[in-house]
Amino acid sequence: MGGETQCKVCGRTEEQIYHWEQYPETTRRLINLDLYDTHTPRQKITALAEEYNIPFSTARQIFAEDGYHQKPN
């Protein structure tokens, strides 16, 4: 199945990764929301920064202080 292989780090498909920069912001946000429960903390920090329009470094600090983290498998 072409394009269905998912990145183990971000959860996006090969097609999504290849076309990421061409996608409108809304599409990228929808993809991130769809992957929110399964993707890495970095993606969650990026989503937090984008949602609140804050720098990545600030979102990372909030993420760490509030104890947000991915549960171990």
Image (cartoon, rainbow, N blue to C red):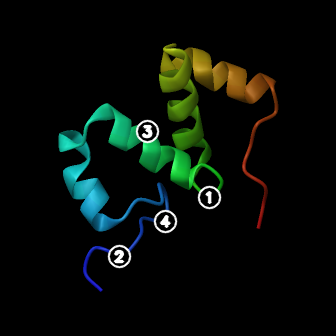
Q: Residues within 10 Å of mark 4 (few under 14, many from 20)?
A: few
Q: Earlier in the sequence, mark 3 or mark 4?
A: 4
Query: Which secondary structure lies at badge 2?
Result: loop
Query: Which secondary structure lies at badge 4?
Result: loop
For label 2, the residue is 4
Q: Mark 3 or mark 4: which is in front?
A: 3
Q: CA distance from mark 3 to mark 1?
A: 15 Å
Q: CA distance from mark 3 to mark 2?
A: 19 Å
Task: Name the amino acid type tagged 3.
Answer: Arg
Query: Which secondary structure lies at badge 3?
Result: helix
For label 3, the residue is 29
Answer yes or no: do the residues labelled 3 and 2 have beta carbons within 8 Å?
A: no
Query: Which secondary structure lies at badge 1?
Result: loop
In this orientation, which residue lies closer to the viewer: 51 or 40?
51
Task: Name the amino acid type tagged 1.
Answer: Thr
Q: Earlier in the sequence, mark 4 or mark 1?
A: 4
- Give residue 70's position: percent from left, percent from top: 72, 50
Residue at screen point 49% across, 65% down: 8
In this orientation, which residue lies closer to the viewer: 25 or 61?
25
Task: Name the amino acid type tagged 4.
Answer: Lys
Residue at screen point 41% across, 69% down: 6
Residue at screen point 50% across, 32% down: 46
Q: CA distance from mark 4 to mark 1?
A: 10 Å
For label 4, the residue is 8
Q: Is residue 37 left or right of residue 47?
A: right
Q: Quadrant of residue 12?
A: bottom left
Residue at screen point 54% across, 45% down: 33
Task: Name the amino acid type tagged 2.
Answer: Glu
For label 1, the residue is 38
Q: CA distance from mark 2 to mark 4?
A: 12 Å
